[in-house]
Image (tube, rainbow, N blue to C red):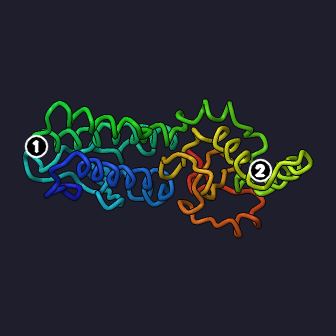
């Protein structure tokens, strides 16, 4: 299994695009598709690996048979630890190994295609600008953001939020502020408050022109499109549970 080998990439941008595709696939496995991923990692099966594919999909399968393999191989036997750990700890462990694998694949391509020092530095800079999979899965990259933001009011703030917009707009009109100024002020306030927030599914940063929703259980924010929730549907949800929290099961 080569995880979908990048055959024709020759530039930093192409290798980084491959990295992002594989990363997105693994993030999906460990967040939105976590129930399916858990099911596929049967401890009764042989050594299994989690592969992220360039097309943003993922696959749990046996390692490559050829020696040496076409690409560096991900951690072997992730299924064996599944039932011996708390689910969140097991997912975090898989995330750490996946981060390591993604870096090894990217730098393998860099060596294979003869990247010089400047190219390697540029590639790593691109990668380093993204949160790690471990940070997304464990939520460690969001702790500082949560301390800054008004998470205690998240249930009334699910859409980043129309109620807040109306309240802000009303206050500004009472001060004689024009509509354009209201929009700009609200956008600046929203960006300042949530600018460091990362989507729990795709890992991308918050943007004020996108619909977001917060899980009432783990208090992690998600793009509506990543968890298939529209603003209209959110209006009828009293308590939102993200896919990960919805699929959590009791441990023996």
Indicate which disc, 1 or 2, sits on the residue closer to the N terminus. 1
Where residue 39 sits in the image (x, y, percent)? 43, 58
Q: Determine if residue 252 is in view.
A: no
Single out the mark in the foreground, 1 or 2. Answer: 2
Q: Quadrant of residue 189?
A: top right
Horizontal side of residue 217 vs 210, given as left or right: right
- Measure how far apart labels 1 and 2 are at the Cα level: 53 Å
Q: Residue at the location (39% across, 42% down)?
A: 94
Q: Residue at the location (29% across, 35% down)?
A: 124
Disc 1 designates what residue? 112
Disc 2 designates what residue? 182
> How many discs mark residues in the rendered view?
2
Where residue 211 sits in the image (x, y, percent)? 63, 58
How packed mark 2 is, by other alpha carbons closer than 10 Å (few <14, some 14-19, many 20 or more), is: some
Tell me the quarter of the image containing the N terminus.
bottom left
Q: Is residue 128 above or below residue 38?
A: above
Q: Secondary structure at mark 2?
A: helix
Judging depth in this view, the residue of 118 and 175 nearest the camera is 175
Q: Secondary structure at mark 1?
A: helix
Horizontal side of residue 245 vs 76, given as left or right: right
């Amino acid at each position: 299994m080569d995880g979908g080998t990048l055959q024709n990439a020759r530039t930093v941008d192409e290798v980084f695009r491959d990295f992002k595709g594989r990363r997105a696939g693994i993030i999906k496995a460990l967040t939105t598709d976590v129930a399916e991923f858990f099911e596929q990692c049967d401890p009764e099966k042989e050594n299994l690996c989690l592969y992220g594919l360039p097309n943003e999909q993922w696959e749990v399968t046996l390692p490559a048979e050829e020696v040496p393999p076409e690409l560096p191989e991900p951690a072997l036997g992730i299924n064996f630890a599944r039932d011996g750990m708390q689910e969140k700890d097991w997912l975090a462990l898989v995330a750490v190994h996946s981060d390591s694998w993604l870096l090894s694949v990217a730098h393998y391509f860099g060596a294979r295609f003869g990247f010089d020092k400047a190219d390697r530095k540029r590639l790593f800079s691109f990668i380093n600008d993204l949160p790690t999979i471990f940070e997304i899965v464990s939520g460690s990259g969001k702790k500082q953001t949560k301390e800054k933001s008004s998470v205690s009011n998240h249930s009334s703030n699910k859409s980043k939020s129309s109620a807040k917009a109306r309240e802000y707009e009303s206050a500004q009109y009472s001060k004689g502020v024009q509509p354009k100024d209201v929009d700009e002020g609200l956008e600046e306030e929203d960006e300042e408050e949530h600018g460091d927030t990362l989507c729990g599914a795709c890992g991308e940063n918050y943007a004020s022109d996108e619909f977001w929703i917060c899980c009432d259980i783990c208090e992690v924010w998600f793009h509506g499109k990543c968890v298939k929730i529209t603003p209209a549907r959110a209006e009828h949800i009293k308590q939102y549970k993200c896919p990960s929290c919805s699929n959590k099961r009791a441990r023996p």
